[in-house]
Image (tube, grey):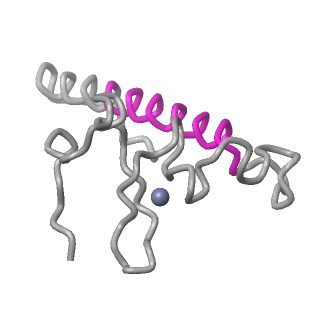
Amino acid sequence: MKEETKPMERPTREPLALRLAPRCLAKTRAGTPCQKAAATGKKRCRLHGGAEGSGAPPGERNGAYRHGLYTREAIAERKAMRSLMQCFRQDARDALSELDATSGTRPSRVRS
Ligand SMILES: [Zn+2]
């Protein structure tokens, strides 16, 4: 079994940028992670699906595309809206607790 190596201590002559690149975690025939540098912007090395032009096209051109609910853009939009709503809720909670602290009365609880 290969010992886990830290990128800076790898005994190779790779340039520093390559040494610091995220590693490919594809499983090799030996059952260990591949450990080659992942291709730019990808999670796998060029031999394990990270090569340029490999993989299915994104969006409507992808064969598994149905309605766009799970596209990266849609997921990112929902995530942004969720965090915005969390901010609003926290602000409302803070305002209510401030009301509690000052007057002791507060409007009847609104269902969320
Ligand atoms: Zn690999």
Classify residue 5 by image quadrant: bottom left
Which residue corresponds to the image point at 40% horizontal and 60% vertical from the top-left? Answer: 25
Which residue corresponds to the image point at 19% horizontal and 47% vertical from the top-left? Answer: 10
Q: Residue furthest bottom?
A: 30
Instruction: Looking at the picture, tell me which residue is in the foreground, 14 or 17.
Output: 14
**As displayed, is residue 21 above or below residue 43?**
above
**As displayed, is residue 48 above or below residue 104?**
below
Classify residue 86 by image quadrant: top left
Which residue corresponds to the image point at 37% horizontal and 50% vertical from the top-left? Answer: 23
Which residue corresponds to the image point at 77% horizontal and 53% vertical from the top-left? Answer: 56
Residue 77 shown in magenta: yes
Q: Main secondary structure of the magenta part?
A: helix
Q: Residue 29 at what x, y percent from top left?
A: 45, 79
Q: Residue furthest front?
A: 13
**As displayed, is residue 64 above or below residue 60?**
below
Q: Residue furthest top?
A: 102
Q: How many marks?
A: 0
Magenta stretch bounds: 70-91
Instruction: Looking at the picture, tell me which residue is in the foreground, 34 or 83.
Output: 34
Picture quarter with the N terminus: bottom left
**As displayed, is residue 89 above or below residue 12?**
above
Q: Residue 50 at what x, y percent from top left?
A: 58, 49
Say left or right for 104 vs 24: left
Say left or right for 55 vs 41: right
Q: Residue 55 at what x, y percent from top left?
A: 72, 53
Residue 1 shown in magenta: no
Classify residue 91 by image quadrant: top left
Instruction: Looking at the picture, tell me which residue is in the foreground, 102 or 97.
Output: 97
Instruction: Looking at the picture, tell me which residue is in the foreground, 84 or 48.
Output: 48
Q: Residue 64 at what x, y percent from top left?
A: 81, 61
